[in-house]
């Protein structure tokens, strides 16, 4: 009974559905309407490199983002999650739109405590 977790999300199944069943439109709708604090479609596309990346790369990145949001279970807003994902990337690989998104998100979010230093170092 130690492995019994009826309310735990099945991430393998969710990732399969996001990768193989849902369309890009459905994924975009999921992320933009994700409570609390979805983002407009233009900001989502800008953050994930829609214009710079190919359609397959964008779809994969969008699928991974949806899986992260699903796993978090509505505990963080979409801008917070996107900011955390982008901050873990190599800065040399970020596009200009992604850098601008990071700066704009830092200004929009009300971060307190130790994250203020992070915001001041980026913004």
Image (cartoon, helix red, strand yellow):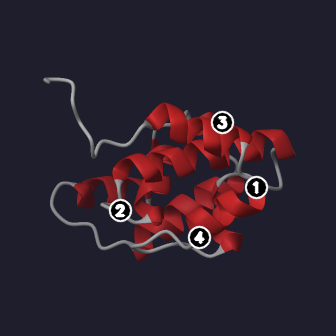
Residue at which label 4 appears: 32
Residue at which label 2 appears: 74
Q: Is residue 107 above or below residue 90?
A: below
Residue 52 x, y percent position in the rendering: 82, 49
Label 4: state its secondary structure: helix
Q: Residues within 10 Å of mark 3 (few under 14, many from 20)?
A: few
Residue sitting nearer the eye, 123 or 12? 12
Describe residue 36's horizontal placement relative to residue 56 as left or right: left
CA gap, disc 4 and disc 1: 12 Å
Residue 86 x, y percent position in the rendering: 52, 46
Q: Is residue 53 above or below residue 69?
A: above
CA gap, disc 1 and disc 3: 23 Å
Mark 1 or 3: the one toward you? 1
Residue at point 27%, 46% (across, down): 7
Residue at point 18%, 54% (across, down): 114
Residue 94 seen: no
Q: Residues within 10 Å of mark 2 (few under 14, many from 20)?
A: few
> Of the residues under marks 1 and 3, which one precedes in the sequence?
1
Residue 82 x, y percent position in the rendering: 50, 55
- Residue 93 marker: 3
Label 3: state its secondary structure: helix
Residue sitting nearer the eye, 116 or 53? 53
> Of the residues under marks 2 and 3, which one precedes in the sequence?
2
Residue at point 50%, 31% (across, down): 12
Residue at which label 1 appears: 24
Describe residue 27's horizontal placement relative to residue 109 as left or right: right
Image marks 2 and 3: residues in contact by CB distance under 8 Å: no
Mark 2 or 3: the one toward you? 2
């Amino acid at each position: 009974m130690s492995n019994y977790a009826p309310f735990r999300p099945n991430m393998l199944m969710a990732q399969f559905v996001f990768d193989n069943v849902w369309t890009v439109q459905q994924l975009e709708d999921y992320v933009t309407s994700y409570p609390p604090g979805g983002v407009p479609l233009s900001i989502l596309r800008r953050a994930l490199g829609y214009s710079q990346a190919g359609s397959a790369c964008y779809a994969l990145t969008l699928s991974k983002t949806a899986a992260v949001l699903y796993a978090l279970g509505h505990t963080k807003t979409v801008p917070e999650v996107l900011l955390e994902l982008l901050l873990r990337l190599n800065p040399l690989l970020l596009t200009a739109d992604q850098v601008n998104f990071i700066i704009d998100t830092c200004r929009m979010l009300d971060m307190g405590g130790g994250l203020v230093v992070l915001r001041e170092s980026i913004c």
